[in-house]
Image: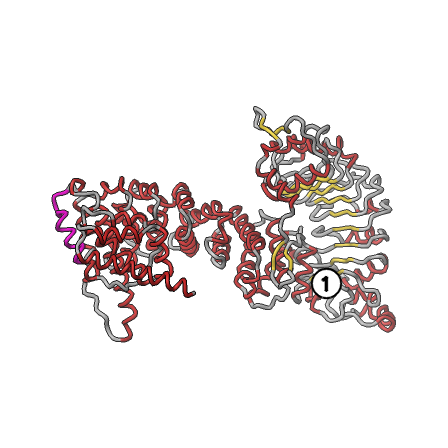
């Protein structure tokens, strides 16, 4: 287990920051050109004059996978020269290296080799053990590492191999079919043997009887094993024995005489300190059977009682660890269990113990995470930092196991949603977000995984908490928006998150959103709903998202126009004329388009100008404030229609600012439209609130300088007055910063603007002066 999550002295939860050495490795891993160059074939080769010690090489491989996975043959080629590089301990996880890359590594006469989820390594490479295995002290072939087995899961024919690694002390095999000729006697140093999920077939565990130092034997998910128990009983030096099963289904793990069988093991393996019988019935039903009653009576009188009859001899010498996870008859819930530490599902401590011991058993670990999920769902988990570490470690180690990712992400949702969220440090938040994105990216086609991930991400501060993974997150969100069920929950939560990110980021990130196809994706969603005459929150948010990504980003405005955006605008206007939120969002977007001078000619058509002019009168469409019960709804409708009228005026003001020569249509006339615009402005309430976020007043201030068309100035100064009156703390300062006071002062002194414009300009200056006074008082 990673044990990265720490409970800090101040009560916060976080991870230790990177050391200076780790930062240096991270820099090199992300910029391999520092130490290497590309060959013509694309392989990495170490630069001349560089020699890397064993410590550096081992740690580089570990850090490269941590910071910049996956590890492939091109990077492995850095270690092709054994005179300038030296490897001893190699742990590979999710590596895409081939047999050639593995041989490059093994030429270093490795001390330890571990491979998990390295599915490019096939049985055709097993000869490498014969050539280079003499130096190995530890060999671990985990899931999807097919060096000694066929890759086809239903292929039960054993591979004819021998373990030509005479100095092995630790051997881990997973899912290997053992043939009866396989020899172990020559492995005199072997102390740890893990045969998880291996198929014994005709292989007998009697072959292990000649191993004088064998201390640990793991036979998890090895079944049937009842006929091998006598061979196991001969391994008298065993300190750890695991004969657990992941499930009691199909009769697996069921013994005919469970109490006597466990008693027999205890009588013969007196040095056992760790025993795992999870998933079996070896713990009995909690009541001594008739056959064992007489034998146990004297033991209980001498040592004390136990609720697991087969362990009666260990009541005064309890095991250090006992695995009882999902045993028959709920053995883990019994009272008198002769063990200091128990893995089970009876309580939080047992569940966390199970997670710690089963960290490389993904199917079983998924069930453990489900148990944790239920604890957090009902807020019954006390040891938050250990639980969080367990979940993150499980998801990081077993990325390809979809059900584990789903279960883990569901648990993360309740952890992050809980009351301890405020205690999470930055590094821990980053780890949670990165782990979620890894799982979502790996299982992009699974809606449940996406749903869990999206919901968990909504618990973070957007966009501040996710900026370090902005690009990956946007791509995952776009998939959720465009590739999942229409009107489905996943699509709705994805577009909500996408809009939230688009709303609160800077211009560089808005450019990136456009490059990834956000505008075209939104237009596709809108087109689909127009085709089906369906209005929903997805359509509304799609327009809102485009409103946000086009803000002060001209190229995204162009993408909107090039994608038939104006055609969809008119269709939405005609198909859904009473949807005020939709109309507000569409006109906000067109306000951004109108700010781009070189795009404004595309808006200069009779049809568009007539629509904009008609929308000026949105506020006078007959909405009346009713009785008390409907006042809030009517106020909201009035606010929405004011924003439509305001944005329509803004669009027309920018178009008109280009001068009379740019007004290339005969009707409506420029003068007529300007008069209607001024009439609309005079109807607006200067204290009206708005759902808008200006990052710069440059487009508005440019209209303040438009002395050739005072009506444009009228709209601009009204906009500034409204924003500084309603939101003085934010916008008075922005006016000051962008030289707005001087521009307004020049306007007041100029002869062209009419009196009403100058009056409103003075309101802005006075409000900003008050803002300065408030700041000084504070």
Q: How is the image coloured?
A: secondary structure
> Which x, y percent locates residue 739?
33, 50
The answer to whether residue 416 shows anywhere in this view is yes
Q: Residue furthest bottom?
A: 628
Residue 722: x %, y % from top left: 28, 60
Assess disc 1: are there few (<14), some (14-19) or many (≥20) residues with their C-alpha within 10 Å of its C-alpha: many
Image: magenta residue range: 665-679
Residue carrying label 1: 342
Horizontal arrangement in the rendering, residue 762 relative to residue 292 (left or right): left
Q: Where is residue 602 in the image (x, y as percent from the top left)?
A: 23, 41
Q: In the visual, does 246 lie left or right of 753?
A: right
* Image quadrant where residue 62 sits: top right
Q: Which quadrant would residue 617 be assigned to in this image? A: bottom left
Task: Please name whichever residue, 80 or 188, is drawn nearer the observer in this view of the structure.
Answer: 80
Q: Is residue 675 one of those drawn in magenta?
A: yes
Quarter of the picture holding the C terminus: bottom left
Q: Which residue is drawn at 87% across and 46% down?
A: 212
Q: Nearer the viewer, residue 398 or 72?
A: 72
Q: Nearer the viewer, residue 291 or 7?
A: 7
| Secondary structure at numbered mark 1 | strand
Outermost residue toward the top in this view: 40
User: 245 and 54: which one is in front?
Assistant: 54
In the image, is residue 52 above or below residue 491? Answer: above
Q: In this view, does 576 lie above or below 99?
A: below
Magenta portion: prevailing SS class: helix
* Residue 611 seen by the camera: no
**Image: 638 above or below 2:** below
The residue located at (74%, 58%) in the rendering is 276
User: Looking at the picture, how far across and down is residue 504, in whole percent?
Assistant: 41, 53
Within the image, what quadrant is residue 260 found in? bottom right
Residue 666 located within the stretch drawn in magenta: yes
Q: Pick out the residue farthest to the front.
A: 749
């Amino acid at each position: 287990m990673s044990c990265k999550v720490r409970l800090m002295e101040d009560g916060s939860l976080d991870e230790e920051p990177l050391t200076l050495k780790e930062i240096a490795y991270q820099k090199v891993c992300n910029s391999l050109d520092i130490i290497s160059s590309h060959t013509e074939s694309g392989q990495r080769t170490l630069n001349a004059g560089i020699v890397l010690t064993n410590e550096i090489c081992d740690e580089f491989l570990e850090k490269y996978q941590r910071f910049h996975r996956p590890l492939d043959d091109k990077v492995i080629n850095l270690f092709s020269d054994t005179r300038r590089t030296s490897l001893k301990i190699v742990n590979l996880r999710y590596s895409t290296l081939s047999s050639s890359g593995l041989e490059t590594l093994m030429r270093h006469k490795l001390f330890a080799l571990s491979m998990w989820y390295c599915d490019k390594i096939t049985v055709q490479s097993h000869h490498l053990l014969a050539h280079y295995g003499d130096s190995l002290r530890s060999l671990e072939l985990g899931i999807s590492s097919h060096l000694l087995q066929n890759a086809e899961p239903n292929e039960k024919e054993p591979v004819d191999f021998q373990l030509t690694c005479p100095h092995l002390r630790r051997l881990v095999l997973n899912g290997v079919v053992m043939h009866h000729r396989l020899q172990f006697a020559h492995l005199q140093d072997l102390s740890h043997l893990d045969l998880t999920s291996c198929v014994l077939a005709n292989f007998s565990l009697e072959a292990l009887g000649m191993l004088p130092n064998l201390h640990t034997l793991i036979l998890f998910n090895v079944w049937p094993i009842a006929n091998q128990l006598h061979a196991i009983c001969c391994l008298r030096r065993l300190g750890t024995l695991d004969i657990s099963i992941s499930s009691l289904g199909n009769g697996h793990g069921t013994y005919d005489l469970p109490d006597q069988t466990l008693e027999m093991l205890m009588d013969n393996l007196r040095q056992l300190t760790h025993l795992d019988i999870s998933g079996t019935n070896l713990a009995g039903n909690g009541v001594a059977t008739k056959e064992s009653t007489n034998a146990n009576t004297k033991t209980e009188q001498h040592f004390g009682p136990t609720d697991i009859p087969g362990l009666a001899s260990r009541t005064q010498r309890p095991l250090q660890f006992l695995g009882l996870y999902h045993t028959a008859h709920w053995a883990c819930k019994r009272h008198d269990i002769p063990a200091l530490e128990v893995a089970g599902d009876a309580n939080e401590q047992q569940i966390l113990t199970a997670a710690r011991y089963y960290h490389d058993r993904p199917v079983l670990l998924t069930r453990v995470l489900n148990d944790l999920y239920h604890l957090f769902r009902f807020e019954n988990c006390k040891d938050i930092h250990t639980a969080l570490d367990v979940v993150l470690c499980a998801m990081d180690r077993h990325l390809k196991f979809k059900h584990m990712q789903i279960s883990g992400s569901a648990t993360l949702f309740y952890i992050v949603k809980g009351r301890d969220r405020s205690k999470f440090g930055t590094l821990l938040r980053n780890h949670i977000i990165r782990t979620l994105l890894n799982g979502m990216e790996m299982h992009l086609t699974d809606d449940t995984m996406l749903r869990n991930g999206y919901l968990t991400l909504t618990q973070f501060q957007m966009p501040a908490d996710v900026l370090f993974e902005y690009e990956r997150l946007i791509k995952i969100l776009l998939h959720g928006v465009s590739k999942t069920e229409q009107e489905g929950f996943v699509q709705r939560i994805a577009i909500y998150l996408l809009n939230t990110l688009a709303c609160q980021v800077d211009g560089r990130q808005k450019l990136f959103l456009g490059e990834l196809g956000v505008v075209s994706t939104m237009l596709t969603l809108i087109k689909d709903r127009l085709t089906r005459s369906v209005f929903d929150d997805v359509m509304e948010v799609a327009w809102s998202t485009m409103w946000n990504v086009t803000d002060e980003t001209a190229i995204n405005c162009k993408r909107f126009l090039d994608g038939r955006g104006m055609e969809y605008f008119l269709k939405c206007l005609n198909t859904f004329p009473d949807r005020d939120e939709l109309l507000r969002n569409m006109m906000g977007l067109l306000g951004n388009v109108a700010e781009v001078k070189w795009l404004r000619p595309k808006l200069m058509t009779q049809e568009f100008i007539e629509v904009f002019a008609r929308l000026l009168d949105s506020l006078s469409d007959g909405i009346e404030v009713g009785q008390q019960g409907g006042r809030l709804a009517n106020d909201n409708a009035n606010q929405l229609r004011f924003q439509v009228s305001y944005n329509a005026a803004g669009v027309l003001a920018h178009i008109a600012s280009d001068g009379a020569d740019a007004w290339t249509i005969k009707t409506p006339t420029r003068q007529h439209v300007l008069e209607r615009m001024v009439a609309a402005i005079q109807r607006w309430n200067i204290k009206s609130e708005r759902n808008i976020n200006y990052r710069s007043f440059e487009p508005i201030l440019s209209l303040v300088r438009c002395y050739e068309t005072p009506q444009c100035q009228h709209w601009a100064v009204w906009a500034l007055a409204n924003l500084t009156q309603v939101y003085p703390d934010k916008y008075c300062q922005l006016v000051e910063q962008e030289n707005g006071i001087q521009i307004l002062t020049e306007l007041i002194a100029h002869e062209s603007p009419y009196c009403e414009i100058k009056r409103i300009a003075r309101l802005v200056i006075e409000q900003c002066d008050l803002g300065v006074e408030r700041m000084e008082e504070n």
